[in-house]
Image: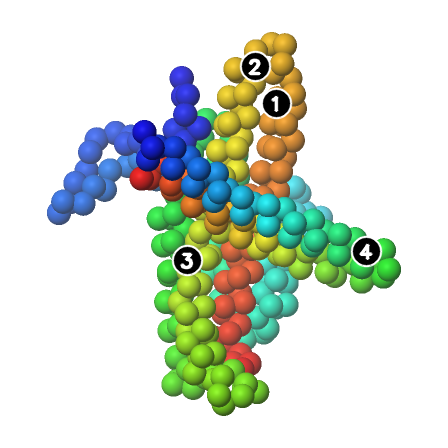
Amino acid sequence: MELEAAKMIGAGIAALSLAGAGIAIGNIFSSYLSAAMRNPSAAQKQFPNLLLGFALAEATGLFGLVIALIILFAF
Amino acid sequence: MATNPMQQFVVQRIGPEIKIAGIDLSFTNSSLFMLLSALGICAVLFLGTKEKRLIPDKFQLLSEILYNFIAKMISDTAGSKAKPYFPFIFSLFMFVLFCNMFGMLPYSFTVTSHIIVTMLMAVFILIAVTIIGFLKHGFGYLKLFVPSGVPVILLPLITVIEVISYLSRPLSLSVRLFANMMAGHTMLKVFGGFVVSLGILGGWLPLGFSVALTGLEVLVAFLQAYVFAILTCIYLNDALNLHH
């Protein structure tokens, strides 16, 4: 039973990595918005980079979520 | 009724069991949805290019948008030398996109939510890019691991780091796609479970969340296909134009 509890705690801690992804995504969009307000003509060109940055940042957090799911379901 | 949010990822056999030399090669729901995606791509592109009109209809417009989108992406990230690899990157993008989008249909199966599928594609890309690099530059391709302008003292360390980062490319490429699809679909099903367990009174809030999350997941499905293709272009760029 203690092993079960330890697994749950470990999975919860691993899922905390999504906080970093949240900060990163907020940072990317806020930087994009403030830059786009200053120079709206250059904003359209950087939109693909925004999406790329969003996807890369989100994925980093999801790696932690995968660890959590592995702990919960694979062991 | 499925009560576990992970039950949607179970691979089930459809039809008879086929075993060749001890390896299970049966037709599964995963293969069914891969086949459906491939047929969907063929159908869209066939309908789009059947009649070449000056004023395009919907399917022709769709194929033209997809073609231009990928062609522009390749020329922006990997330069004109990557033109010959357009069919490969286009098929890769379309396959990942259609697998993700077919997975968004209710009761369907998401092929890309299994790491074996994404890992296969990523390892294939790594091997292909390595072979292309060695064919184009010979042993000069190893210069990729030795960036210029680095102090000599740091060079052994940097080289080791570069080699590790090069070899971990397929891992990050495949886990990114797989984790996004799996996490998104699990989240959708968890919220769907909340709707059932909260009943007719409290179930409206998670239902609204579910609708919003479905929209987000469609965006993510497109975005991950795009990121998969653009990272392949970036890796190809390393192999074709040795910048370091």
Q: Share a chain, discs 4 and 2?
A: no
Image height check: is B201 above or below B92?
Answer: above
Give me the C-alpha separation between circle 1 and circle 2: 9 Å
What's the amino acid at mark 2? Leu
Q: Is residue B10 at all visible to an observer of this figure?
A: no
Residue occupying image coordinates x 63% and y 63%: B72
Q: Nearer the viewer, residue B46 or A65?
A: A65
Residue occupying image coordinates x 20% and y 41%: B24
Image height check: is B236 above or below A73?
Answer: below
Q: Which residue is labeled 4 in the image?
A: A34
What's the amino acid at mark 3? Leu
Q: Nearer the viewer, residue B166 or B111?
A: B166
Residue B198 has which mark?
Answer: 2
Front tag of 3 and 2? 2
What's the amino acid at mark 4? Ser
Q: Chain of mark 2?
A: B
Give whichever of discs 3 and 1 has the lower sequence position.
3
Give me the C-alpha separation between circle 4 and circle 3: 34 Å
How is the rendered protein coloured?
rainbow
Q: Are marks 1 and 2 in contact (CB under 8 Å)?
A: yes
Quadrant placement of the C terminus of chain A: top left
What's the amino acid at mark 1? Pro
